[in-house]
Image (cartoon, grey):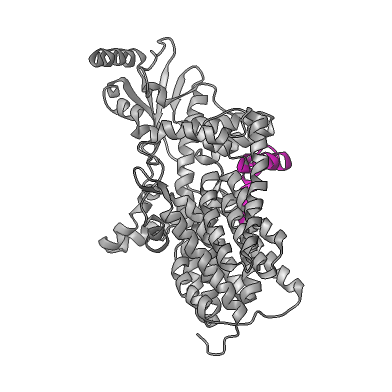
Amino acid sequence: MPRNTPYSPPSGPAWASWATLLVVLGVALAVRLWLFFGLSGSDDATYSRRGLEVALGLWLPSDYIGDLRYGMNLPIAASLKLLGMNTAGLAGWGLLCSLAEIALVYLFAERAWGRRAAVFAGMILIVIPIHLSSATNMWADAPFSFFLTTSALLLWSGVKSGRAATILGAGLACGLAGWVKPEPAVVFGLTLTLLALIHLRDRRQLLWIFAGGILAAIPNLILFAWAFGDPLYYLHAGTRNLQANFIENAAPWGDHSATYYFRQLFLDGRSFWLAPLLAVPGMALALFKGSTEERQAGRYATLWAVLIVLSFSFFVYSVSPLRLIPKQQNYALIFAAPVALLAGLALARVWPALAMVILAPLVVGSLMLTTLDGYSRHLHGETNFASIRFARQHPDAVVFVGQQAANLNAVLSLMGRDHAANLRLLSELAPARGEASPLPLERPHFVAIHPNWPESRGRAGKRLKGESARCLRPVEEAVGTPNITESMVTGLVARLRSVLPAAIDRQVSFTDEVLKPQPVRFHALDSACFNQGATQLACVRE
């Protein structure tokens, strides 16, 4: 590190600061639009369908919590009204939140450590794979992360200024995060409370945070009371969902390990690439180098990073049996802002030439990892789109597909796009309770199946691979094709893997699913054979 590195934020005209921020946001927007590929049928279809329903004035009850996250559904509906009933309208809310979070990180870093640190922090956040992919995947993570980052930075502003309105705003932002994901917003509320207790001179001002959270929650309760006649509808729906899908309080969709996020940050590499490794020396610089004001901001950013990771790793989710909070890869997005701040500070404190040497592999590697992740979701989406196209090509038949394909088909229908009217769910072939209804013999039946669909690992998949396999006849298969960027990156990865030692190659085996994609396979289903098998199975059970 240069001995005479200046630590005081540079003074300069305000227009230069805003012009630099606009350039950073322009780069962020360009990269996100470049790697955008559209709907895949996963959580994006859930939020898209619900947003479309709200835009059309449909307020339908549901026990699925994703349907009740109106911090997603209402803004998506507004975006659709503004941009039209199209994919741009569906993606607009998440993209806006991603860009806004980058702007917040830039502004905090510039005021704390100077424009150079701000540019590096912004550029790192632009390309962190999990942040880049979440910007346009139409999941709830980008809005949720934006509100948490807003809350943390408003609290810091309130600490510096002592203004009650700013501290109230921190609580409001945390409460708005609860509109998106209520349960994890509560966990972050504990992090925010600890940050406030440590930094506020007058701890009575903590009450402003609680007041802000309550003010944000009240309209949500009013909305549920108006739409469903129950202000606690979300809580009751969540309880029913918990009772139906959780066994011994174990989340069917998450990992309860305490080390999950530490491995994701420092060992896996696919979500954050090199940024956390830069953030570690950034912590040391933030804590011990610079002016008093810079070190104060550095201590806040460091504590924010540490507390949020610890909170979402060790929060006790269940006492009997003892379980820690369930964890998912996409939830780690909430760590991206403090990681980018600390990593950006680390780059700002080394020689410019060395900073560029470090930044280059960080950017290139991040873009490649994001492309691979996007191609994986692109392929997944194509299995659902192919199922819908197959059904439309066979309008007189019944086509059994996965739940995600059905959700995507509902989105297309609500948007007024071409969709299939002859879909049924694979789960109907092997219901969790009771027996499957006999299939009518007068109509042909087809089954679409892909090894990555949840149904292929569930009851329907086991039945179709087991006693009903003799009733299936392969007729067709389909696999997605890469776009130009995906083709270039997968080609480069394939060439690199061909020369890697076996031990290293195993570490990147996650790329197998995009280098050797599995097709969705369509089978003709013999109705008489299937009905006979169901009857025999029922007799055996009796």
**Quadrant of the rendering where the C terminus is positioned:** top left
Q: Could you say which is closer to the camera, residue 176 or residue 109?
A: 176
In this rendering, position of residue 503 left or right of residue 31:
left
Span highlighted in magenta in the image = 71-98
Residue at image location 67% in from the left, 80% down from the top: 10
Residue 300 picture quarter: bottom right
Q: Nearer the viewer, residue 458 or 59?
A: 59
| Residue 43 vertical position relative to residue 123 in the rendered view, above or below | above
Spot occupied by residue 131 in the image (x, y as percentages of width and height): 53, 56
Is residue 79 a member of the stretch shown in magenta? yes
Residue 15, percent from left and from top: 76, 71
Q: Can residue 27 be seen in this snapshot?
A: no
Count how many numbered circles sit on residues in the image.
0
Per the image, is 289 magenta?
no
Give the x, y percent position of residue 433: 37, 21
Q: Picture coordinates of residue 435 (x, y %)?
A: 35, 17
Whether residue 88 is situated above or below residue 507 in the rendered picture: above
Q: Is residue 350 left or right of residue 504?
A: right
Going 41% across and 58% down the picture, which residue do you hit?
A: 264
- What residue occupies the far top of the structure in this picture? 442
Residue 409 found in image quarter: top right
**Residue 365 placement, left or right of 150:** left
